[in-house]
Image (tube, grey):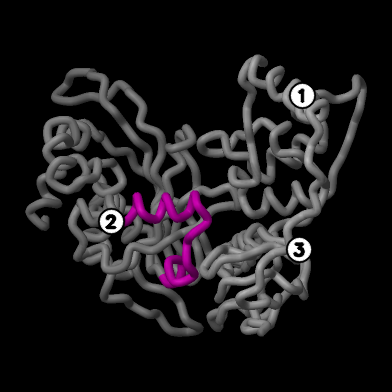
Amino acid sequence: MSTEVKVPVLPESVSDATIASWHKKVGDAVKRDENLVDLETDKVVLEVPSPVDGVLKEIKFQAGDTVTSQQVIALIEEGAVAEAKDEKPATEAEEKKAEAPKAAKAAAPATKKAGTAELSPAGRRVAEQHGIDPAQVEGTGRGGRVTKEDLVNYMSGKTGAAPSGARPEQRVAMTRIRQRIAERMMESKNSIAMLTSFNEVNLREVMKMRKTMGEQFEKAHGIKLGFMSFFVKAAANALQRFPIINASVDGSDIIYHGYADISIAVATDKGLVTPVLRNAESMSFAEVEQAIADYAKKARDGKLALEDLQGGTFTITNGGTFGSLMSTPIVNPPQSAILGMHAIKERPVVENGQVIAAPMMYIALSYDHRIIDGKDAVLFLVDIKNQLENPHRMLLGM
């Protein structure tokens, strides 16, 4: 009996998906809940598991094809067994010949290994389309993972051996997610009167608290105390005091949100994604740290669900992770503001008439000037600064 494999039900905001890569081919045995294919939407990569045990009988769409919600993309012969390949018994001479390269390989120096399991879905598709052996490509992603950009650079001769004087080029289609990011950035540029205000924060007290309380915090909650939870809690508190920063524009109306659903920008191989911490104003430091760690892992593994990314009333992005000293982050519509964190640097500051070295960070607030006045933006940043320079205020709800 044949069982249909269908595209999952897509939310209203996602009209279709693209076949990124198949993990099985026709004739392969499959097990129930085993991932068959990756579908790329403009927000996340979805895995489609097998509904039954059996053999993959037919693939109706290939990598690069566009499919819609509940469309049949493959057939599985339920309960069938994959045919064994016809193999002749090896002779003694053939066995010795086969063992020779294995012994040589074992004696050779260890080299970088990169299989399809270490490729991002977008990278896997590029490798399959162009017949690239990932083992030949140096991965620059987290943990040595080979990214799409690594493969593109490899094909263009920017990495690995290239003929002297060669000027190769390679045209590669944008992924669905990258196309959507581009659209959103242009939408923000063209529809928002965006302005950015800056301030600087002395993080000495935050660093002191992390040093003195970090070990106890980790023992109590099973998660490390990072910087992001301080910024999330400071922002959530400040959003309660300056609700216009947390509002959004809908035509000629302003929508005020009585909750702080804070989006946290996370960099992935496929682009920037913004999973949401819902009701951040009610979360503890430990809950914030755990949620961020869970989202980061899901993002690295390509496991973020659409519901993880939907909504959000305010965004925090941390360019300091990559060494950025200062930037003007772009507002993500329909939100009206975004807070940018940056690198912590020891800089000279004046305290009580004395010049001292202090761990300083520039912070930036980009905002929609159609509804947020400069005064509110500046006071919001000052509120963030005061909380971070006196972190006990957050613990006391001040």
27 or 208, nearer to the observer: 27
64 or 277, nearer to the observer: 64
Query: Would residue 140 be seen by someone viewing this image from the given angle?
Result: yes
Rendered position, 211 above or below 46: above
Q: Is residue 109 left or right of residue 371?
A: right
- Name the N-terminal-most of marks 2 and 1: 1
Residue occupied by mark 2: 235
Residue occupied by mark 1: 96
Query: Would residue 329 be seen by someone viewing this image from the given angle?
Result: no
Rendered position, 234 above or below 90: below
Residue occupied by mark 3: 63
Residues at badges 2 and 3 in contact (C-beta under 8 Å)? no
| Residue range corresponding to the magenta coloring | 291-311
Residues at badges 3 and 1 in contact (C-beta under 8 Å)? no
Q: Is residue 147 left or right of residue 285?
A: right
- Name the N-terminal-most of marks 2 and 3: 3
Q: What residue appears at the point 69 percent right and 42 percent down from the top-left corner?
A: 149
Q: Position of residue 256 (x, y in %)?
A: 33, 77
- Label 1, residues with CA under 10 Å away: few <14, some 14-19, many ≥20: few
C-alpha distance separating marks 3 and 1: 40 Å
Identify residue type, mark 1.
Answer: Lys
Rendered position, 231 above or below 107: below
> Which quadrant is the C terminus positioned in?
bottom left
C-alpha distance separating marks 2 and 3: 42 Å
Q: Is residue 221 left or right of residue 172?
A: left
- Label 3, residues with CA under 10 Å away: few <14, some 14-19, many ≥20: some
SS label for mark 3 = loop
243 or 215, nearer to the observer: 215
